[in-house]
Amino acid sequence: MLIVLESVGSVFDTKNGIIYPQLEDGSYDKEFSISIDEEEVASDWWESLSEEDFNVVKYGVSLGKQYE
């Protein structure tokens, strides 16, 4: 499932543990993936996550906007 992380302008693939940058038009850059499992994510990205978005990334659960 793909979930929009509004606080950091990213789209999160909950199945694969991958984040993608969200583009201005609402789509996401499929060519630029970053694995959260391999610790490729910058510390400032983690610090910018809202509490709700952090829970989505940590637990893969969201009540927010899903990407279709």
Image (cartoon, rainbow, N blue to C red):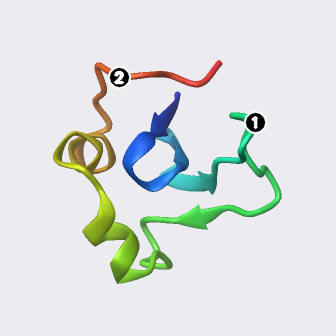
Mark carried by residue 64 = 2
Task: Please tell me whether mark 1 sits on a helix, a strand or a loop.
Answer: loop
Q: Is residue 62 left or right of residue 22?
A: left
Give the residue at x 64% y 47%.
Answer: 22
Give the residue at x 34% y 81%.
Answer: 43
In-front residue for pair 50/57: 50
x and y, in percent, of residue 14 in the image: 46, 39
Q: Quadrant of residue 52?
A: top left
Q: Quadrant of residue 8?
A: bottom left
Q: How many marks?
A: 2
Q: Residues within 10 Å of mark 2 (few under 14, many from 20)?
A: few
Q: Quadrant of the C terminus?
A: top right
Kindly identify which residue carries mark 1: 25
Q: Earlier in the sequence, mark 2 or mark 1?
A: 1
Eyeballing the image, is 46 above or below 59?
Answer: below
x and y, in percent, of residue 34 in the image: 59, 66
Q: Residues within 10 Å of mark 1 (few under 14, many from 20)?
A: few
Eyeballing the image, is 18 above or below 37?
Answer: above
Which mark is nearer the camera, 2 or 1?
1
x and y, in percent, of residue 44 in the image: 36, 78
